[in-house]
Image: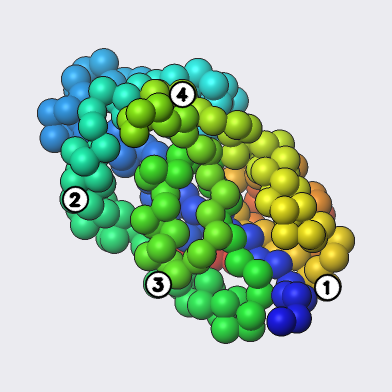
Amino acid sequence: MDAEKELALFDLDNTLLSGDSDYEWAQFLIERGVLERVEYEAKNDRFFRQYKAGRLDIHEFLDFQLEPLALHPREQLDAWHAEFMRAKVNPMIRRKGLDLVRRHLAQRDLCAILTSTNAFITAPIAREFGVEHLLATELEVRDGRFTGKPSGTPCFRQGKVTRLAEWLGQRGRTLASFEASWFYTDSQNDLPLLERVTKPVAVDPDEILRKEATARGWQIISLE
């Protein structure tokens, strides 16, 4: 089988989705009474503002976000996640995002979703988009339960570049081995990877990314 000639990479939150699955998962647990509203809602909002401003400490955030996963058995978490998909995620899936992914898949491009959101939350979402390959923040598991700690390099900012290089290396590829490499994202946090692909695309970008994309002549699109 011939190697894929083009690489298509997609950010997830506020790119293929019209919201943030990380944020909405915490809100979902708060609404179900799993997390204490006053404490967790304030922290969730604070971390979300820091992310949007490009000032998020990923390790501090992961301590907050992964802790609830360690408190419950996997069967319960999976049941909650199925409800989360119906209540929160499916309404956020952008039709134009689905069409974009399907177009690249139809062209037989190598496609992957790259997201800082952890793999427990995002693996079912990637399947919903029909994308086989997911590079997300991985979770430490011990005796079949999440420990509340990440495993390996968080897939955030420069970490996306690192994780992508590792994944491509396992396939005997590099970014340079593709005729074109696309990366679609909304966030200034993804500038390290946008600078490395041949086809950077800003999707409904935040203010800083819009300025950077305009200054550098990058494509700007909307999937809303």
Which badge, 2 or 1, comes first in the chain's sequence?
Answer: 2
Q: Could you tell me residue 148's position as x and y percent? A: 40, 23
Discs 1, 3 touching: Cβ within 8 Å: no
The amino acid pointed to by label 2 is: Glu
SS at mark 4?
A: strand
Which badge, 2 or 3, comes first in the chain's sequence?
Answer: 2
- Image quadrant where residue 34 sits: top left
Q: How far apart are labels 1 and 3 at the CA level? A: 27 Å
The amino acid pointed to by label 1 is: Glu
The amino acid pointed to by label 3 is: Arg
SS at mark 2?
A: helix
In this picture, is 131 found above or below 20? below
The amino acid pointed to by label 4 is: Lys
Q: Nearer the viewer, mark 2 or mark 3?
A: 2
Residue identified by numbered label 3? 95
Q: Nearer the viewer, mark 1 or mark 3?
A: 1
Discs 3, 4 touching: Cβ within 8 Å: no
Residue identified by numbered label 4? 149
Q: How far apart are labels 1 and 4 at the CA level? A: 37 Å
Point 19% across, 20% down: residue: 36
- In the displayed structure image, the side of residue 131 where residue 167 appears, left or right: right
Q: Could you tell me residue 135's position as x and y percent? A: 57, 49
Discs 2, 4 touching: Cβ within 8 Å: no
> Residue pushed farthest front?
143
